[in-house]
Image: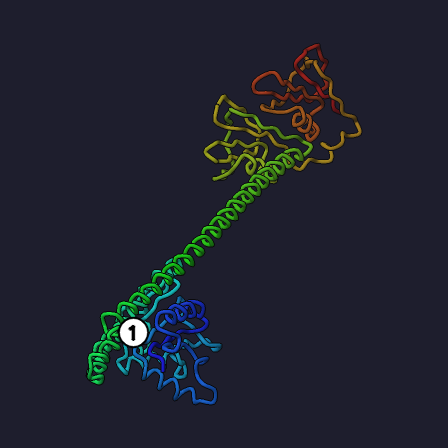
Amino acid sequence: MGLIFINYRREDSSSTAGRLHDRLALAFGRETIFMDVDHIPAGVDFVEHLNSIVAACKVFLVVIGPNWLNAKDEAGQRRLEKPDDWVAVEIEGALVRKIRVIPVLVDGADMPKPSELPASLKPLARRQGVEVRHKHFGRDADALIEKVRDALGGSVWRQFRKMAVPIAIAALLLGGSIALFRIWAPFTIETIVPREVQAAANAEAAEQQRVAAAKAKEERRAKAAAEAEAKRESQEAEQQRLAAAKAEEERKTTQEAQLAGLPAAGFSIINDVGVEGEDYLRIGDATVESCSSACIKDAQCKMFAYWPTRVCYLFDKNFGTYPQATSQVGLVRVSPTPAQQRPPAAGFSIIKNVAVNGDDYLRIRNATVESCSSACVEDAQCKMFAYWATVTPRVCYLFDKKFGTYPQATSQVGLVR
């Protein structure tokens, strides 16, 4: 019958429990350990057999993993609360019989609190636990073995040592002669115990070497796994960086394409100037791209001003500008009319490098030659226009009559109707 009972939940810590079984078997003998139903003889009532084993054991180990406390069945009920949960039944039996119960915390599990346990298992929370960590399994398992050995009342060699003297004395009494004493002398406590102790020491040294070799192998595997993980993370970071760079490049390309596809009436950005008129709409937390897009989509908007404080101002008229180093001004003509796309039947032509002799009836500041011509086409009163690009701000002049021209190298004149 086993003296050490290992209680565990298969889906929670079967692999770690198996390793602990092997280490305990090396220290105490496989026949002294009971782990699960695989140890129950065929044809035996396992309920009665389990109860008898729990009653006979000296040390009861409860292996607690991360999912031990909240493990649930198919119906979603916590297993510890079920009356037929054998993990809980075995623990309760050990606690009732006052058996030495040692919680073994594995894989980073925490000791359960009394409030988290059923009433029959609450005394388990008062038992001093032993932690067995994956990275220090050999060292922690050795510490657990010492605690189990103390709980059993000493090692097998201590029991043998206690029995050696009575055996030797009995042999001397039964022999009744010096000759018999000489025959038994080589097997007295002075000779037998040192040999056994030396054998135990050799076995312990061999076990330590095996544990050290296994630990070194485990550390090499952990190092290789850590290096592989670091390499993987580095590759992922590089992929993310490349993806971000690609996304930024695509964003810039999209913006350039949007700017390149502005309405035929024309679009231009004038840097480092301010607008002298009153806006009709302000947009906060904007970019120069979103500001220009808002103006293009709004038929009321004729121009906008964007400030690096991320504020966008929309204007429903073309206003003059003044020097200002921190703003950008866009002049926009949106939703071009058919007249803008195609000159009227009366014809449309641009005459460059001439000036007009007559008086204008309307002046438009901060204009472009496209916006100037569009303004004239859309206004039935306009018969011709003159656009000056070299003055600041650039000016568009509309005329309600056709006037003569004279040479001038800095203006363009459109003749309409």
Q: Is residue 345 above or below residue 138?
A: above
Q: Is residue 327 above or below residue 128?
A: above
Q: Nearer the viewer, residue 340 or 380?
A: 340
Local SS, label 1? helix
Percent of width and height locating residue 215:
41, 57
Quarter of the picture holding the C terminus: top right
Q: Position of residue 260 (x, y in %)?
A: 66, 33
Counting labels gives: 1
Q: In the shown orientation, is residue 353 left or right of residue 192?
A: right
Viewer-closest of 72 and 296: 72
Q: Quadrant of residue 135?
A: bottom left
Say if 115 sits above or below 230 in the image. below
To which residue does mark 1 refer? 156
Q: Assess disc 1: are there few (<14), some (14-19) or many (≥20) residues with their C-alpha within 10 Å of its C-alpha.
A: few
Nearest to the observer: residue 351 or residue 130: 130
Please provide percent x and percent y for residue 311: 48, 36
Whether residue 43 is visible, yes or no, is yes
Picture quarter containing residue 131?
Answer: bottom left
Q: Identify which residue, 14 or 404, lies in the foreground.
A: 14
Quarter of the picture holding the N terminus: bottom left
Name the amino acid, label 1.
Val
Residue 237's x, y, as percent? 52, 44
